[in-house]
Amino acid sequence: MSIAAPRPRNPVGGHVPVAGGLAATGLPYARDIGAETVQVFVANPRGWATPAGSPRQDEAFRAACAEEGVPAYVHAPYLINFGSHTEATAELSVASLRHSLRRGRAIGALGVVVHTGSATGGRPREVALAQVRERVLPLLDELTHDEDPWLLLEPTAGQGASLCSLVADLGPYFDALDRHPRLGVCLDTCHAFAAGHDMAAPGGAKALLDELVETVGEGRLKLIHANDSKDVAGARKDRHENIGAGHIGADPFGDLFRHPATEGVPLMIETPGGKVGHTTDVARLKELRDG
């Protein structure tokens, strides 16, 4: 990461590993791949533990991101599902997301990304959304400080009884949460493509973003997970591919940079290939942005 002066219209970066410390491990990795923005886990993404974190690492991470003009984001654990029919899962989801939001504030994160979940146990979508309201609205109401992060809903690829995969699904989800002023969207391009939004078709990226603005309103899109797809549009498979190497292709990512709805919105890769693949993908997105 280099000092941004001025910050680009759309900072480009990636999810970085943090084993060993947010600042000690995450920031050097981000610099190595040329990231202008970063995303991190603050807990085991596949567990329910809520670790306190290291105040020293938190402060070092926060200070470096502020000094270098690097927006930071937190991705909440994958197990969270507020539509679950299992009481224990719903309760653990509350504790886990509250932890991610509080840790996000501690490290200066602008947003916390959470998957929108599914209606398990064969329950109707309306029942699951009522539970989303009951469990999540109080968490949103706790975000009362200016430095609190946004809660960013990430629609899934449409597997199973997903509560939110197509952009249209965000409407009822937002309504269930009273379109709270701290509620935003993290759009994953692979997920959207897999759910049926054919970004590879002529004008596909524009159509996707136009529908998103119409559904949730202007200013709600806060982050884009920029991932190509190993599978065809509508496959409902969440398999990320490197930028330009999948079925979406490179050009639609260029279209994302030119849409009014993405003004100031960071693009974050979650692609395969380790550091080499990440470096290549960050550079490719910068080319598409700056070219």
Image: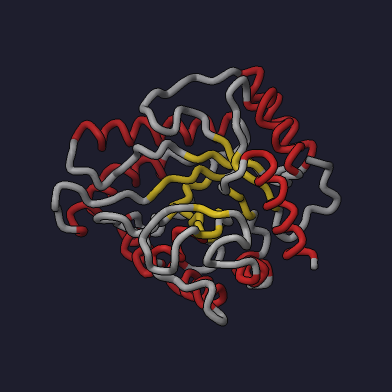
Residue 223 seen: no
Residue 98 rendering spot, x and y as whole percentages: 41, 33
Q: Residue at x 46, y 65 (%)?
A: 193
- The front one of 268 and 110 is 268
- The front one of 232 and 217 is 232
Residue 287 seen: yes
Number of numbered callouts drawn: 0
- The front one of 287 and 71 is 287
Residue 127 rendering spot, x and y as whole percentages: 17, 54
Residue 101 rendering spot, x and y as whole percentages: 48, 36
The image quadrant of residue 38 is top right
The image quadrant of residue 79 is top left
The image quadrant of residue 34 is top right
Colouring of the image: secondary structure
- State whether residue 250 is above or below residue 84: below
- State whether residue 259 is above or below residue 117: below
Image quarter hosting the N terminus = top right
Lateral position of residue 34 relative to residue 172, left or right: right
Q: Residue at x 32, y 36 (%)?
A: 93
Q: Residue at x 62, y 39 (%)?
A: 274
Residue 246 rendering spot, x and y as whole percentages: 55, 62
Q: Residue at x 75, y 53 (%)?
A: 283
Image quarter hosting the C terminus = bottom right
Farthest residue in the bottom direction? 202
